[in-house]
Amino acid sequence: MRIGKGHAWVAAVLLAAAGAVAYVAMSPGGGAPVVAKAAFDKPIRPHVDHSAFFPASLSTPQDVTRACLGCHADAASDVMKTAHWEWLGGEVQVPGHAGLRRIGKKNLINNFCISVIGNWASCTKCHVGYGWKDDGFDFAQAANVDCLVCHEHSGTYVKGDAGMPAKGIDLLAAAKSVGTPRRENCTVCHSYGGGGQGVKHGDLDSSLENPTGEDDVHMGGHAFLCVDCHETRRHDIRGRSFSVSVEDSNGVACQDCHRAPPHQDPRLDAHLDAVSCQACHIPTYARRLPTKMFWDWSKAGDPDRPDDPHRYLKIKGEFLYDQDVVPEYAWFDGSVDRYLLGDRMDPSGVTDINRPRGDIRNPNARIWPFKIHRALQQYDRQNNVLLAPVTGGEGGFWHDFDWDKALRLGAKATGMDFSGEFGWAKTAMYWPLSHMVAPKEQALGCDACHGDHARMDWKALGYEGDPMTVGGRR
């Protein structure tokens, strides 16, 4: 991993520049091991031409939804029960916090665009609805469900502020094109979240819209769609993003299809209790397009620096990107700790927003590859809490370039106290990798993790040394 000058603290907190020891292993929660030939039959999805089902004109996007509901009567009510609509999950126990609570994009803080709260209109470009421009959005209006963003095939549909279609969109053409969600319907939000391509995920970008087998063996080698693994029933899509979740219920795992020890060599199968599939089969990420590794909000607002989307933007600050990156590795049992708005933090160290849980003594944990996105972001010097500024709109930082004003507006929107004194805190977010699976011929070999030049920092993972010589966990 390449780290820019002046960020020595970044290098100091690397978990381990490490790889893994087997060609394949198990998912974080344990369970059945995997097979060489997957127990999966790709579904046949006949396409229905919808062009005859729509009237001659559609004046509003809500007219499109009403037309869809004429045949798919339950579709909107099903969507409205999901996290894609509510931007909240079900009730969960957040480690270190009392009681059950619902968390999600709607009420969490991150270290890229910081928070949805107070910034609804710009953030909700990726909401599966129309018109979420402030905290008064009515989540009960079925006509505001956006059917097109997941189903249109025209390639011309673009969402704008508050999730409304961008100006000039031909709604009729988009409506007539609908079908089974394609990769592009998913990547339009998931590859560009956080304000640009590759900002959040290291293993999701537009290279997966039409990938080769080397880009991703499932999507490029076997023509999988996203919904083949992220199976969907009544619009509830399987899968978990640990940027907004703390546990893996309704998640997707390799052993959903790969269900028996896969290796001809028992030495490799012996690794299955300690190493995830992803650790060996995703040797690098962001292989074709760069991903953001570091974001320094403290540098924002300089009128004399030229804008460059991969280095500096006046509205957002300074960035570091990297490409074809070796992951960092940590034990992971399928759950994470989670920083919540108002939690106290130590400004002298690094605040982990969503640190993975698990260690060498946890039998359910596996060594897992991660992209770790690091940042300098705003915190309250008196209260020692991370702050969520308002960035867009009147009074927001992007409008007035006044941090004090932006932070006061953010405190009001989030209901937090703000002392009026702010500084810059180091934070880290962990993104477990599961896409960009390489062909088996490119899986890591023994010398990638063992020996003098191995990528694995065994002591950082809790071993006394290289387990090839000192033995594995007991």
Image (cartoon, rainbow, N blue to C red):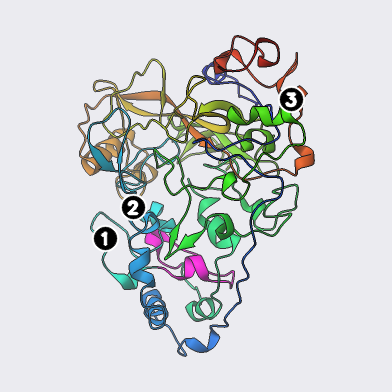
Q: Which residue is mark 3?
A: 448
Measured in 3D between alpha carbons, the distance from the residue under mark 1 to the one under mark 3, in whole angstroms, is: 51 Å
In terms of depth relative to the viewer, which is nearer, 245 or 153? 245
Q: Classify mark 1: helix, strand or loop.
A: loop
Asked if one can make out residue 409 in the rendered structure from this viewpoint, the answer is no
10 Å neighbourhood of mark 1: few (<14), some, or many (≥20)? few
Q: Quadrant of residue 467?
A: top right
Q: Residue 219, relative to residue 248: is it above or below?
A: below
> Earlier along the polypeptide chain: callout 2 or callout 3?
2
Q: Badges 1 and 2: C-beta atoms under 8 Å apart?
A: yes
Mark 3 belongs to which amino acid? Ala
- Image location (x, y in percent) of residue 332: 50, 30
> Earlier along the polypeptide chain: callout 1 or callout 2?
2
Q: Quadrant of residue 443?
A: top right
Query: What label sits on residue 237 in the rendered view?
Result: none
First to last magenta residue range:
146-165
Query: What label sits on residue 137 in the rendered view?
Result: 1
Q: Nearer the viewer, mark 2 or mark 3?
A: 3
> Earlier along the polypeptide chain: callout 1 or callout 3?
1
- Image location (x, y in percent) of residue 49: 57, 83
Check residue 172 for magenta coloring. no
In terms of depth relative to the viewer, which is nearer, 228 or 266? 266
Is residue 470 found left or right of 137 in the rendered image?
right
10 Å neighbourhood of mark 2: few (<14), some, or many (≥20)? many
Q: Residue 169, relative to residue 356: is it above or below?
A: below
Q: Residue 273, relative to residue 441: is it above or below?
A: above
